[in-house]
Each structure stands twice: as structure tokens, then as C-alpha cells.
Image (cartoon, rainbow, N blue to C red):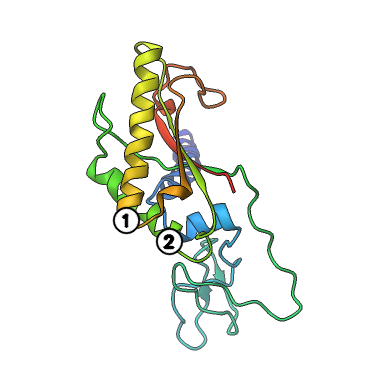
Amino acid sequence: MRAFALCLLIGGVAAVPAAALSQEDGPRTVDDYLCAFAGECGDDATDVEEAPRPGAPRVSAQRGFSLSNPNARPRRPAGTARRTTPGAPRRPAAAQGQRVNLRLSFETGSARLTPTAEAEARVFGQSLLLPQLANMRFRIEGHTDSTGSRAGNLALSQRRAQSVADFLVAMGVPRDRLQVQGYGPDRPLPGTRASAGENRRVEAVRVS
């Protein structure tokens, strides 16, 4: 019986990281891109979804634990600029070269975005149209795994990157803000085999 209880305890502990990872893998928001490329990240534990009842603890949207702080500020609407206190140090903007995996999927052997990928790309496009990112330029990079010929993968990665750029332009992002480059299988993710599926990706890199 004690051995069975010990197994349950170990299983419960192991489930915690898995749950956290599943939350991190959820759909991205405009605020995620503002944080990555402009350095405008959410406030610490004082960000909340809604004002609690008088005397009730506040629950942090960032950390997942309660804070008994009646003076905590409500969470900003997505994509809105943060107000700063006069004389307070400004948060430094993210450096050039910052890259984000857009986590886009395509039909096999095709540059056509899936409906899920279109939804993800639309969020990125919305962020590019906000004032915080409006003066930035990006390189849209296509990458593949090593399955198949290198020449074929180079061409496919270029078409996929171009497909994403065209989608963003159709949303109103000026074309001169976007560069397009396909690298095929030449730049696998660190620590992965060249043939690993994780290498099939499109990344956005801030270039200015």
C-alpha cells in the first residue's frame, strides 16, 4: 500500500511540468510579440484578469498564485501601451537579432498555410501593425529538416517564407518591412538531429 501511494506521489509531481509545458505551447498573443520584439512584457505578479471582490485574494495571471494586494492594478488590454511613472527607468527594447519561431504548419510538401497556421500568422501580423513595432523590419526565415534533397528543401523553405510574407502584406504590413530567406536544412535547431521534425519551421527575426 505504501509503495502504491509512493507511485501516486511521484506521478503527481511528474505531471506538474507537463501541465506547465502545455500552457506554454498554447496560442500566442499580440502581447507575446510585443514582449519579444519591443521589450514590453507584462507586469509582474500585479497583473490580474479582473478585479476581485472586496477582501478576496487577487490571482496573478502571470504566476498562477494568489496575492492579497488590494492596490494591485488590473491587467492592460492586449496591445495597449504601458503607462510609465515620470522619472522611472524605461524597460530596454529587445535587441536586433531577436528571433521567434512562429510555429506555423503547412500541408506536406506545400507552401500553403493550414487554417491553424493562418490564425497564428494573423496574430503576428496584428502585432506588426501596432505602434510599438511599426518602425521595425523583419526577416521571415523558412527552414526544413534534412529529409529529401537539399535543393528541393531550399526551394520549399523559400516558398514557405514567401507565403508567410505575402499573408502579412495582405493584412496591411508594408512589404518593404519584410525580407524573405529560405535556408532549407542548413540551420537545424541546436541540439536536434538535422532530420528532426522540429526543424520544419518559419522564424521571424528583427533586423532593424
Amino acid carrying label 1: it is Met
Q: CA distance from mark 2 to mark 1?
A: 9 Å
Residue occupying the point 49% across, 39% down = 14
Q: Nearer the viewer, residue 31 or 133?
A: 133
Residue occupying the point 30% across, 52% down = 170
On the image, the x and y values in percent for residue 184 come to 43, 22
Q: Are marks 2 and 1 in contact (CB under 8 Å)?
A: yes
Amino acid carrying label 2: it is Leu
On the image, the x and y values in percent for residue 85 come to 69, 80
- Relative to 175, residue 111 above or below: above
Residue occupying the point 33% across, 24% down = 156
Labels in figure, total: 2
Q: Which residue is mark 2?
A: 129
Residue occupying the point 36% across, 22% down = 155
Identify the image quadrant of residue 50.
Answer: bottom left
Identify the image quadrant of residue 150.
Answer: top left
On the image, the x and y values in percent for residue 10 come to 50, 38
Q: Secondary structure at mark 1?
A: loop
Of the 4 image quadrants, the one containing the N terminus is top left
Label of residue 130 in the image: none
Q: Which residue is mark 1?
A: 171
Q: Residue furthest bottom?
A: 54
Q: Nearer the viewer, residue 14 or 62?
A: 62
| Label 2 CA crowd tier, 10 Å (few <14, some 14–19, many 20+) | some
Q: In the displayed structure, does residue 172 sit left or right of residue 141?
A: left
Q: Nearer the viewer, residue 2 or 131?
A: 131
